[in-house]
Image (cartoon, grey):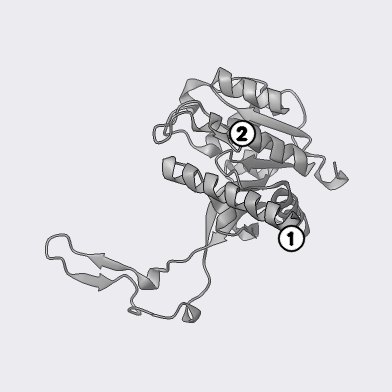
């Protein structure tokens, strides 16, 4: 573990219930449950002094500990509902543990549902966070659709008008590049997290850019199928390259 990252904790939220894709955190992707894959990735990065999984589910807890994570407590039911936010989950974990020991310098939120996140991504994001002197950072990907291309449609008349006051701008080269969070990793100074109860300090917030293929976020069966396809494609590409 590098000296600069020795005071960083990773928190991986993984609740048992999920409506769109049942038990998604335990689904096998290339032979590994999603939760185990996230733990393995965090461990391989060698960036964290602690890797914590916050869950309300015994089976997820077992898979996480077998992969090498800590599950120091079970998440309470009020933080395991559909409406519970990742912010509240990470706050619960950090506040509970820092009541017993000194707080870390930095906290990372890693999503098990972003299986294309790699150890190299984590190391690069940590390096950018440190060198950019940021207070918070989130992984993002370049958007392919722009507000300048959107229309609003009146449901009664069917009339459409451009969303942008500039009208429709056809060429993407004429538009500013925009990015959207992909949910894979968030970094935040724990002092800011605990004092402001926020993952964002927009005066000192960084962006770690990931490709669209690496940014697959599993929320439903189609997302999972896309992740399976991408994993298989990469394995085939690696076999072809080493042949």
Dot 1 and dot 2 residues touching (CB under 8 Å): no
Q: Nearer the viewer, mark 1 or mark 2?
A: 2
Residue annotated with mark 1: 132
Reply above or below: 52 against 179.
Answer: above
For residue 46, side relative to residue 178 (left or right): right
Q: Is residue 173 visible?
A: yes
Q: Residues within 10 Å of mark 2 (few under 14, many from 20)?
A: few
| Residue 17 quadrant | top left
For residue 179, side relative to residue 236 (left or right): left
Residue beneath the point at 87% across and 44% down: 3
Residue at the extreme right of the image, as rendered = 3
The earlier-in-sequence mark between 1 and 2 is 2
Residue at the extreme front of the image, as rendered = 243
Q: Residues within 10 Å of mark 1 (few under 14, many from 20)?
A: few
Q: Which mark is residue 28?
A: none
Q: Position of residue 96 (x, y in %)?
A: 65, 25
């Amino acid at each position: 573990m590098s000296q600069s990252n020795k005071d960083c904790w990773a928190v991986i939220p993984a609740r048992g219930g999920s409506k769109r894709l049942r038990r998604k955190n335990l689904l096998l992707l290339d032979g590994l449950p999603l939760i185990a894959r996230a733990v393995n990735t965090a461990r391989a990065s060698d960036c964290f002094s602690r890797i914590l999984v916050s869950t309300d589910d015994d089976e997820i807890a077992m898979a996480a500990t077998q992969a090498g994570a800590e599950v120091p407590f079970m998440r309470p039911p009020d933080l395991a509902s559909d409406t519970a936010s990742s912010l509240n989950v990470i706050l619960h974990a950090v506040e509970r543990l820092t009541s017993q020991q000194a707080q870390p310098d930095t906290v990372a939120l890693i999503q098990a549902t972003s299986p294309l996140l790699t150890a190299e991504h984590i190391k690069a994001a940590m390096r950018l966070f440190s060198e950019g002197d940021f207070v918070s950072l989130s992984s993002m990907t370049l958007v392919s659709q722009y507000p300048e291309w959107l229309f609003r449609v009146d449901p009664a008349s069917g009339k459409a008008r451009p969303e942008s006051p500039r009208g429709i701008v056809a060429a993407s080269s004429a538009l500013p590049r925009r990015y959207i969070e992909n949910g894979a990793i968030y970094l935040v100074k724990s002092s800011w997290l605990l004092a402001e109860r926020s993952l964002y300090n927009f005066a000192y917030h960084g962006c770690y850019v990931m490709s669209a293929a690496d940014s697959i976020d599993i929320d439903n069966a189609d997302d999972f199928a896309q992740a399976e396809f991408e994993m298989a494609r990469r394995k085939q590409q690696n076999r072809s390259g080493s042949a």
